[in-house]
Image (spheres, helix red, strand yellow):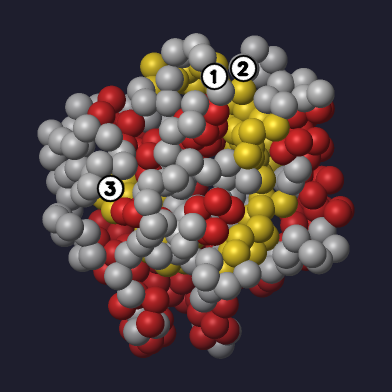
Amino acid sequence: MLKQDRVRALGLMSGTSLDGIDAAEIVTDGHEVFEVLGTAYRPYTDSERAVLRAALGKWQDDDVAQVSALIDTLHADLAAQFPDADLVGFHGQTLAHDPGGRGTHQAGDGAALAQALGKPVVWDFRSADVMMGGQGAPLAPFYHFALAKKMQADGPLAILNLGGVGNLTWIDPALPHPDSDGALLAFDTGPANAPINDLMQSRLGLASDQDGALAATGQVDDGIVAAFLRHPYFFRMPPKSLDRDAFADLTGAVADLSDADAAATLTAACARSVAQALALCPSTPRQLLVAGGGRRNPTMMSMIAKSCEVPVGPIEDAGFDGDFLEAQAFAFLAVRTAKGLATSAPGTTGVAAAIGGGTLSRPS
């Protein structure tokens, strides 16, 4: 357990959009965020991304040695840029996620990373939550609560992260703690960048629809979007979570559309699923702050703003860095884990009771 009040913690995050690794170093006591010290980003190369894509859907008992070793090496290289960190939060790379079924799988060995870095590493954040009946995701809401407190929000607000999958956190900052009853409600909204990135990769050999430029020139197929929104997932009450490829049939649905129309339709599907998600919140938030790569897509942001009845803007409007929010979150959660504090609660993952997730590995 950590004894010091303020900890210099490094968070490492590689998301389901498969773009690269985010690193962020913060100072926190696991309750408040005192300072963000620095950030760094390491994009995956095309060959590295191909290795990761080939491993999607694989579990711990599959042959994932190559991808695990790759994840460990790349994360160690990036973490070496932050030699003064006291503690590292290592998310790993999600390959499969099936709460209530086979569980959850994030590739990467935190014990090996601790040895490589010579400092303690907290990792495997999701397994304990899933074992206790939770969804294991999303895990950033406790950090979102700390940010709402830091910005002195005077009413309910929502933070949306648009990575490979979209996830929403509704926050009541009037309550004292993130695990207070009614303080948080969090869940995955639906696919976000993942199907768009997959479309661009398979059709054009590109990693993403840069700035939503292709989608902006296309026509949305409203019939496909309407059919997508009839999926049973959208009628389940939260908390709830998704695997990256839970809506693989959506990609098939746009197969006969032109590149531009397919990109526009996938972007609209993401935007309208966000609007449906807001309807499930305990009350209408006063604003929706957007983080993650999707907020840099003007077409996506415009579609979300038109679909929702609340003010929508990038999280930079509140003074935070939307590119590194999840990396910061895992630094924060690492400190909470090391101090024996909860990292998820019934309102965030559906877990039976507030629980501290994560495994702490120390170098020998």
Whether pointer 1 and pointer 2 mark residues with C-beta atoms closer than 8 Å, the reply is: yes
- Choose mark 1 or mark 2, whichever is in front: 1
Instruction: Name the spot of residue 352 as percent of width and height, x first.
Output: 39, 57
Residue visible at 38% across and 82% down in the picture: 232
Instruction: Name the spot of residue 26 as percent of width and height, x first.
Output: 50, 21
Q: Quadrant of the C terminus?
A: top right
Instruction: Name the spot of residue 60 as percent of width and height, x first.
Output: 75, 60
Residue visible at 57% across and 45% down in the picture: 125
The answer to which of 274 and 341 lies nearer the viewer is 341
Residue visible at 61% across and 60% down in the picture: 104
How would you rate the neighbour count of disc 1 (Cα within 10 Å): few for under 14, some for 14-19, many for 20 or more? some
Residue type indicated by callout 3: Leu
Q: In terms of sequence position, does the residue under pointer 1 or pointer 2 come before the other?
A: 1
Q: Which mark is residue 86?
A: 2
Q: Is residue 48 above or below residue 89?
A: below
Q: Which mark is residue 2?
A: 1
The answer to which of 141 and 214 lies nearer the viewer is 141
Disc 1 is placed on an element classified as: loop
Residue type indicated by callout 1: Leu
Q: In terms of sequence position, does the residue under pointer 1 or pointer 3 come before the other?
A: 1
Residue visible at 49% across and 57% down in the picture: 132
